[in-house]
Image (tube, rainbow, N blue to C red):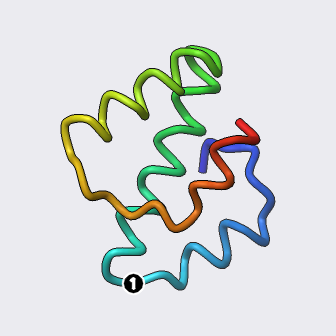
Amino acid sequence: MLTFLPLEQIDEMDKWEGSQLNEAKEILAYELTKLVHGEEEAAKAKESSRAVLPGKCRRHAHRDADR
């Protein structure tokens, strides 16, 4: 997996089901985009996807403030 997320977090996300899978995809997409294009572009891409796909799970929105 191409990410620097802690293995514990990846192991936890591996157990997610249902709508949590979409959240895992969002987290991993952000992390990969950040690695390739930088944090600013990753944030822009995340906001763009949320504008196009409203109502996405934001259970971990507090994590966004750290990024």
Q: In which image quadrant can residue 56 be found? A: bottom left
Tell me if 23 is positioned left or right of 52 in this view: right
Residue closest to the eye, 25 or 48: 48
Residue at point 32%, 82% (across, down): 18
Residue at point 57%, 19% (across, down): 36
Name the quadrant of the C terminus: top right
Residue at point 39%, 84% (across, down): 17
Q: Position of residue 20 (x, y in %)?
A: 42, 74
Q: In which image quadrant can residue 21 be found? A: bottom left
Residue tagged 1 = 17
**SS state under label 1:** loop
Tell me if 39 is positioned left or right of 5 in this view: left
Residue at point 26%, 58% (across, down): 55
Q: Amino acid at mark 1?
A: Glu
Q: Position of residue 24 (x, y in %)?
A: 48, 62
Image vertical order of residue 27 relative to residue 22, above or below: above
Q: In which image quadrant can residue 64 be found? A: top right
Residue closest to the eye, 22 or 63: 63
Q: Residue furthest left?
A: 52
Within 10 Å of the Cα at label 1, are there few (<14), some (14-19), or many (20+) other Cα atoms? few
Image vertical order of residue 27 relative to residue 49, above or below: below
Image vertical order of residue 3 relative to residue 39, above or below: below
Tell me if 65 is positioned left or right of 59 in this view: right
Q: Position of residue 59 (x, y in %)?
A: 52, 68
